[in-house]
């Protein structure tokens, strides 16, 4: 059962890389239906990314909020941080700059705590870019 769920997740990622977001969503939803013992959080995160690609920011936010909940429940700091970064991105698309800063600061805090240097860099870049462009 776990292999089938992961296979659906991988197909969803492949379709997203081709910008076929609807097909990507279909496969990530199949992964959720099948279940694969721990893949629910990954499926939610990937669904959020696919909805972001479609421009459905509210659904992206809903998926990322579900990922945050799951990540907190299982103690997945990396997943939690990534979800906060994705939430910041979704709110940026909606023009809610306060939420962008809030979520990217959460990403920065977690990335720093777990030593995820790339995550720190992403958070600093996104916060800095937002601040820079808010001056214009």
Image: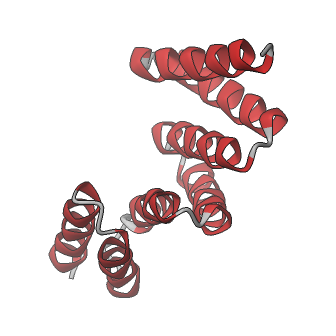
Above or below, 60 relative to 5: above
Above or below, 116 relative to 16: above
Q: Which residue does the image show at 51% across and 17% down from the upper left?
A: 120
The front one of 134 and 120 is 134
The front one of 25 and 6 is 25
**Location of residue 116 in the rendering, given as x and y in whole percent from the top left corner:** 43, 20
Residue 29 located left or right of residue 131: left
Residue 111 located left or right of residue 22: right
Above or below, 22 relative to 123: below
**Location of residue 95 in the rendering, given as x and y in whole percent from the top left corner:** 76, 43
Q: Which residue does the image show at 55% across and 36% down from the upper left?
A: 81
For residue 9, which quarter of the picture? Answer: bottom left
**Location of residue 39 in the rendering, given as x and y in whole percent from the top left corner:** 36, 65
Q: Which residue does the image show at 27% across and 68% down from the upper left?
A: 12
Residue 14 located left or right of residue 38: left
For residue 80, which quarter of the picture? Answer: top right
């Amino acid at each position: 059962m776990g292999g089938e769920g992961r296979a659906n997740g991988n197909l969803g990622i492949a379709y997203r890389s081709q910008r076929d977001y609807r097909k990507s969503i279909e496969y990530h939803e199949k992964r959720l239906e099948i279940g694969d013992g721990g893949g629910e959080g990954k499926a939610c995160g990937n669904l959020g990314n696919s909805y972001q690609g479609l421009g459905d920011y509210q659904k992206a936010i809903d998926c990322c909020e579900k990922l945050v909940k799951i990540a907190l429940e299982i103690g997945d700091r990396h997943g939690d941080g990534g979800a906060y970064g994705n939430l910041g991105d979704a709110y940026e698309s909606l023009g809610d700059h306060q939420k962008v800063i809030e979520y990217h600061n959460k990403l920065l805090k977690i990335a720093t705590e777990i030593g995820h240097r790339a995550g720190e860099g992403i958070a600093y870049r996104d916060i800095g870019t937002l601040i820079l462009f808010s001056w214009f």
